[in-house]
Amino acid sequence: MDNRYFNPEFETMTRPQIERLQLERLQATVRHCMNSPFYKRRFAENGISPDDIKSLDDLKKIPFTTKADLRETYPFGIASVPLEKCVRLHSSSGTTGNPTVILHTQKDLDQWANAVARCLWMVGLRPGDVFQNSSGYGMFTGGLGFQYGAERLGMLTVPAAAGNTLRQLKFIKDFGTTALHAIPSYASRLFEVMQQEGIDPRRDTKLRTLVIGAEPHSEETRRRIEDMLGVKAYNSFGMSEMCGPGVAFECPEQNGLHIWEDYYIVEIVDPETLEPVPDGELGELVLTTINREAMPLLRYRTRDLTRILPGECPCGRHHIRLDRMQGRSDDMIILKGVNIFPIQIEKILMQFSELSSDYLITLDTLADNDAMTVDVEMKQMAVDDFRVLANLEKEITRRLHDEILVTPRVRLVSKGTLPQSEGKAVRVKDLRKKF
């Protein structure tokens, strides 16, 4: 057995083999979805039946599924099995209405653990590694998803959960943690506390692998985190509607996320027209689950913006690669008629060695005009040379204008000024008046 692969049968498939398996699993999934009241009604309303799915191209005959559909059928209206066959559910926070609920059978959980283990094995983790998880446990899938995947691989796991940074660092040192899962903003926070405590991650810890995800982040942020902690940081993509982590993951080449096509069929569509876009072009990611029992989803609009990377990966896997997520279609900032994504601003800020990783974009209305302010923390606690600050602000403003085509107000603030969050970092505050 080739030691590079956790599931060699599936990871080494050729494109024709992948597509044959996808069609077989798609047809079985569509038939299974007829047990779902939602999909049975949706197919009838659109005059289609499972027999109409004769090729992968026929997937386009099926209407999209959206987050609104999940909320309108709350809690169990999309399920394709009786509730007594389910052993767990996860849900979103539901802060803007009903939460989205995803059900799992034991088979679903086993397959999920296998997918996560496959991801972690791909980047070199093995039995004997110590895996520490700084994600929240509970309804958030990042906790239990990585927990069961790391256990399936055979690692000693440290379910540290979110927050309590001093305790996280104690665990890292005392338990000999070699791999850590953390969101990018928290990885930067860990390094800041290491500095405060006099901890050198290269000298005082055994950390060598970092798994990052949950927040869109630029390549510049990834490289900065690697530099700070002395690790290789691998990008992870998952979402609760697709189970959670384990949907797509970088290989050691770090040139795109392999999405496991024995679990999912990928489409990239224009978020406005919903028509497919060519490989290599940015669009909205649409996913169909083909290896799930309790609650398969057909053509689910994720709202995440990415593109399919053309060409083969040197790692030898033929599963397609997705570019890092550029944000969400509903997170796009429209300012003075220009479409802007926060990750574009982050990319520029991270090019300045004087700046820390913490920033906040504020949108406001000034004299009936939209305006953007970018507050960004300096690496040092305070800088007293105002001439140096003024020149730095001017250069940052110039580069941001070149990137986003509008001129923001840039304010350099002292370290520790911006609010800290143990969850996903808040990067944008929109205070504009609604006329």
Image (spheres, rainbow, N blue to C red):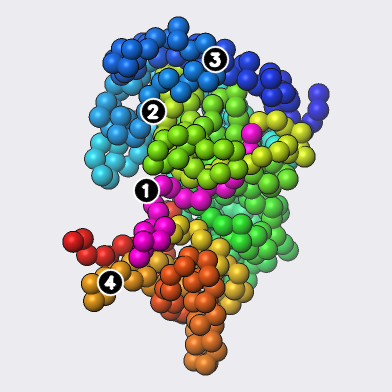
In percent of width and height, residue 18 lies at: 65, 21
Q: Tell which circle, 2 or 1, labels the residue nearer the N-terminal end.
A: 2
Q: CA distance from mark 1 to mark 4?
A: 22 Å
Task: Name the image quarter holding residue 253.
Answer: top right
Mark 1 nearby-residue class (10 Å; few <14, some 14–19, many ≥20): few
Question: Between tags 3 and 1, which lies in front?
Answer: 3
**Amino acid under label 1?**
Asp
Whether 324 is among the magenta residues is yes
Image height check: is 113 above or below 309?
A: above
Q: Which disc is residue 64 wearing?
A: 2
**Amino acid under label 4?**
Asn
Image height check: is 70 above or below 329?
A: above
Q: Which residues are magenta?
A: 320-339
Q: CA distance from mark 3 to mark 4?
A: 52 Å
In percent of width and height, residue 40 lies at: 33, 13
Task: Name the image quarter holding residue 218.
Answer: bottom right
Q: Which disc is residue 55 wearing?
A: 3
The C terminus - image quarter: bottom left
Q: Nearer the viewer, residue 230 or 138?
A: 230
Q: Which residue position holds label 1?
A: 330
Image height check: is 429 above or below 6?
A: below
Left or right: 147 as drawn, with respect to 163: right
Q: CA distance from mark 4 to mark 2?
A: 37 Å
The residue under the point 46% across, 23% down is: 60
Is residue 390 something that shows in the picture? yes
Q: Which residue position holds label 4?
A: 369
